[in-house]
Image (spheres, coloured by chain):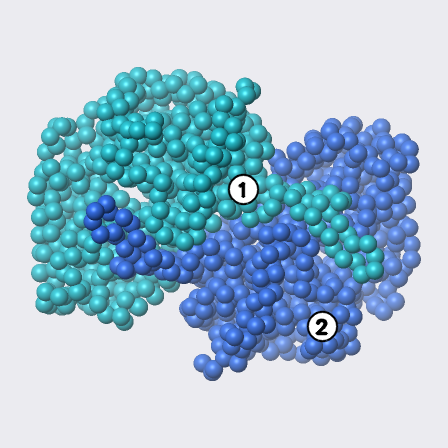
Chain colours: A cyan, B blue
Amino acid sequence: MAAAQLTTDHLTERHRPTLEKALDAIRTRAYWSPHPEHPKAYGEDGSLSAADGLAAHQAVLGRRFELDQPGTDGWTGGETSPYGPALGVEYPHADVEVLLPAMRAAMAGWRDAGPETRALVCLEVLARISARTHEFAHAVMHTSGQAFMMAFQAGGPHAQDRGLEAVAYAYAEQVRVPLVADWSKPQGKKEPLELRKSFTPVGRGVALMIGCNTFPTWNGYPGLFASLATGNAVLVKPHPRAVLPLALTVQVAREVLAEAGFDPNLVALAVERPGEGIAKELALRPEVRIIDYTGSTSFGDWLEANARQAQVYTEKAGVNTVVVDSTDDYRGMLGNLAFSLSLYSGQMCTTPQNVLIPRDGITTDAGPKSYDEVVADLAGAVSGLLGDDARANALLGALVNPDVRARLEAAPELGEVVLASREVAHPDFPDAVVRTPVIVSLDGAKPDADAVYLSECFGPVAFAVRVESTADAVELLRRTIREQGAMTVGAYTTSPDVERAVEEVCLEESAQLSLNLTGGVYVNQTSAFSDFHGSGGNPAANAALCDGAFVANRFRVVEVRRPA
Amino acid sequence: MAAAQLTTDHLTERHRPTLEKALDAIRTRAYWSPHPEHPKAYGEDGSLSAADGLAAHQAVLGRRFELDQPGTDGWTGGETSPYGPALGVEYPHADVEVLLPAMRAAMAGWRDAGPETRALVCLEVLARISARTHEFAHAVMHTSGQAFMMAFQAGGPHAQDRGLEAVAYAYAEQVRVPLVADWSKPQGKKEPLELRKSFTPVGRGVALMIGCNTFPTWNGYPGLFASLATGNAVLVKPHPRAVLPLALTVQVAREVLAEAGFDPNLVALAVERPGEGIAKELALRPEVRIIDYTGSTSFGDWLEANARQAQVYTEKAGVNTVVVDSTDDYRGMLGNLAFSLSLYSGQMCTTPQNVLIPRDGITTDAGPKSYDEVVADLAGAVSGLLGDDARANALLGALVNPDVRARLEAAPELGEVVLASREVAHPDFPDAVVRTPVIVSLDGAKPDADAVYLSECFGPVAFAVRVESTADAVELLRRTIREQGAMTVGAYTTSPDVERAVEEVCLEESAQLSLNLTGGVYVNQTSAFSDFHGSGGNPAANAALCDGAFVANRFRVVEVRRPA
């Protein structure tokens, strides 16, 4: 192996201060990020400007994406942007019989590097990704359908934050045990028993990261970096519609690993041929000992039940609820909810689906409001927010795939439409499928209404559910979390008793709660280093991003005892 | 609920310093224990003396063991000491339809108490158990068959250490996140976004601890205390032959919980009627969200495959290997190995089973030794160690159950007997089944020899395996760990290359290694706060005692966000 171009000294100087700050942030959970959110913050110090990012993106389109992985047995691809254009990128197709052993063989050197070097190398990978944020923004936009600014922020700095957070947790977890300990046990008058003990964190094997269509980097980076930082090799299996952002990620990781003197096969890409369904095959391979997955409940459940040789971390479907009891800022509540329902056309696992409103209405600072008034005002707030096409495009993005569009189109049959969806034309991409959300009112007292609101209807479909009372809303919240899972819960109330009741349900059913959000923080957004994404304690996900449990079982500690 | 007799102030004063020391010990992994190993250290400061402990033990025999649990629908029992006498104790039999909901209902108050109070209450439980160590010693002796001194130490202070270690890990894991955080995100020239966030660790539900026959307290306490300290209720399901030590534990825990103002149903006992097999039923109950199990591979695998609603921590069968390559202390090596093979008649999950010795012999400080010489000298060391009946009884204890005896009696058929087992008479218990270990020599080159040495033969049966070379021994070690799992690995070598090769196998296959032990530390003994018991990375166990991974997934953190 060639001498490393990236020495430990370099890496320490560049990244140790960032690691320290990240470790501090996950302890205090105060606001912190080293990754700027504003596009204009990029373009100096070696990072790509907006123009250079776009050019870099365009340069990878319509050609082969070279990775120099072992075991490439052909080329595959076929992504089409939710905005219309085909990307035309072809990726190497892997012969896993060759690739997986090569990845396993890369692990010993990575293990011997130790937790700190591994963390610093991961931070270099993230820093180079950060420098290419403008390029990644286009890749995320044209695979997920997110609007540019969201693709930039959620696919760039926010995803990098989540990756860094995972590295910090992984590092902290591994250094809880010292590398060496001297042990001396008194024996009364006799000589003490003395041993020298060494402790080595060892990865479990190959980690399989199965990416999703909507947030390829944001949902992918935590597992990828948690596994890599704990000594595992990571095989990235992107969603076939969202390969490019993860292919770029793998490319950067391989480049950094090689420069730091490690085997680049510690990170590799596995793209499937159309209809090949390689996730199932990969998930059952004996080399694969960790799996991270974001996607459908059915495949997540299949992984948990069948990939028994692996630690499986899943984020699946859920039904997110907002309980509306009362508010002292009616206008703020409506504006906040309207934004939450509209952002990325409701295609976030954290978007509220069911807004529970008592049959007799609610009290507000603007006087009592009936159920119908609340629903109509919410519809009005959404239409107002999205009335201007430019603003609508900037908020909504495009529908990510035909399934979402089909659900949207079927939604009016489910109840009373209080806000119809409308088509929005995109000025640059005539084939983009841009739609405003539909709001459907359901009477919770009707038999079988629960068959509708207790199913996840992923996409721009929200249900206003007329419930008997706030107490009933709280009980329905409990049932929804327990049976369907929830990534988020929201509630609006001025009553301490109701607040306490909702909080108690969330504590008992293990769901993350946002209370009385009326300003610029939304129930569907979380901030790395401070907020937990999911709880891992209800059916929507078996892990939270990011906590000790997310990293602790990705490695084991091997102890060697010797007489001192 | 009555006012708490045990206030937080009392608990803090009594136990906070111990908790601090335990937290320090798991970081430094230096020697530490607050629980004296010597029987004479007890009898003052409220702890039971030897005589009082024996009297207390005798007082519970032959009668009903009252626990005042909800849902008791009868009485059951039937333990017989491996030393002969029937214990005659009857325990409440639980109607789980009543008991489990009562346990679940106890959790909210325990959750609200927070991590520190929970830890301190657990430490009070352990302190009261410690004060009754002399009583527990008899209970462990007459259920496990351990000799008195081992029952005293392993069943008393060492088990209490492991419980305390679990509490320390659980506490440390829960306080990694602050209870409250203020979050302020700058917005350029606009006012910052501000939130107040609260974080609450919440238990998962009822934790089921399934006890084992050989080490009811030592193997049971880590799971029990890890689950309790992280906010769960714990249902203790003892092995039907080893109920008493865990019944005493449950009794103490319920007493302390009530005195501290908590619902005693946070800890309860479930004893099965003969042949009832309630572990399977309990393991699948929806209330049960955590399971700790020590026992057979078949039932451990069943739990992992079927109890999908729960986090399952298992310690199962394994095959422990000692590689003998060379030594500079031949006499020390033989003495150390002889002790390891004899202690508790090889009925430890950590006892070596296969001693791999090269066909051409080994080099030692006493000159070269052929395979036959090494085997004969090891046999001689064991006979010497156990030649005196009093010493033999003190080391061996009694065979724990008829299965072990049957395996011992069948062992001579497996190969060439180089040391026959002998019966040892016990001076106090004429019905005790006390046997010295058998050593059987196997030729590794023979076809199908691996069918013998690659199966766990739990009990006083050791195999000397003649291998081609040290290199072959190292490869057989790898295969054994990978296929069968191992709780421990031992090796003797003076060669840095061999040492490195054995270490590499243990790192790659995730097994705990003891090198060149020749003095008073044995491969089958681990020290809480310093040594890991198992690795969780090979088939013998899916968790280690005790590390972050053992506690991190027993609770989830629920966040509540509010505008600041």
Instruction: Name the residue located 73 percent from the left edge and 76 percent from the top edge.
Output: B44
Tell me the quadrant of the picture where the N terminus of chain B can be found.
Answer: bottom left
Q: Is residue B366 visible?
A: yes
Q: Nearer the viewer, residue B557 or A474?
A: B557
Per the model, the C-alpha gap separating discs 2 and 1 is 40 Å
Determine the image quadrant of residue A497. Answer: bottom left
Q: Are marks 2 and 1 on the same chain?
A: no
Compared to residue B34, the image places residue A349 above or below, namely above
Kindly identify which residue carries mark 2.
Answer: B135
Instruction: Name the residue located 70 percent from the left edge and 31 percent from the top edge.
Output: B501
Kindly identify which residue carries mark 1.
Answer: A555
Give percent across and percent down for residue B143.
71, 65
In the image, taking residue A211 as reference, residue B435 lies left or right, namely right
Q: Nearer the viewer, residue A25 or A258?
A: A25
In the image, taking residue A338 as reference, residue A47 lies left or right, namely right
Between circles 2 and 1, the one closer to the viewer is 1
In the image, taking residue A297 as reference, residue A335 lies left or right, namely left
